[in-house]
Image (cartoon, helix red, strand yellow):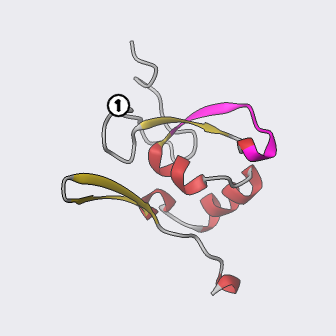
Amino acid sequence: MSRWKGKICRYCRRPLTNPLGSGTTAFTMDHVIPKVHGGRKMVPCCRACNEIKGDMTPDQWSHVMRTVPGWWGLYTTQTLRGMRLFTTLSLKSPTDR
């Protein structure tokens, strides 16, 4: 059985799909505390949450999950000339604008 079968994303709770697939729910592993901050613990999560979370700390990420409903929808896939592109919309606080 594959590592991703039957698993759900630690953050958005959606079922994970084949990591070789192109969808936003493709299986990835995320460092709970980013590597740049010395993190080692990893959890299964979808591609969308992993990309949006980036190098946020758990406190920063929990703030996003509480205040931005449907945050996983900020991550989209687009096709340009046969190449699949992944785009993460930036998260800015009202004070950053």
Q: Position of residue 76 (x, y in %)?
A: 37, 59
User: Does 29 sit above or below residue 77?
Assistant: above
Q: Residue 29's x, y, as percent?
A: 56, 34
Residue 14 in sight here: yes
Instruction: Tell me where residue 10 appears, x and y as whole percent.
Output: 57, 39
Provide the residue designation for mark 1. 18
Image coordinates for residue 18, horizontal then vertical, percent:
35, 31
In the image, 45 versus 79, the foreground residue is 79
Q: Residue furthest top?
A: 1
Circle 1: element type = loop
Q: Which residue is depicted at the point 61% across and 33% down? A: 43
Horizontal side, residue 78 vs residue 90: left or right: left
Q: Residue at x 39, y 43 (%)?
A: 25
Look at label 1 and name its amino acid: Asn
Magenta-drawn stretch contains 32: no
Residue depicted at 29% across the width and 52% down the height: 84
Q: Is residue 33 visible?
A: no
Count of numbered circles in the view:
1
Q: Which residues are magenta?
A: 36-45
Q: Which picture quadrant has residue 61?
A: bottom right
Residue 12 left/right relative to 94 = left
Q: Is residue 24 left or right of residue 32?
A: left
Quarter of the figure with the N terminus: top left
Which residue occupies the foreground of this view, 78 or 23? Answer: 78
Specify the quadrant of the image occupied by residue 86: bottom left
Q: Looking at the picture, does residue 21 appear above or below residue 70?
A: above
Tell me the quadrant of the picture where the C terminus can be found: bottom right
Residue at the left extreme of this rendering? 81
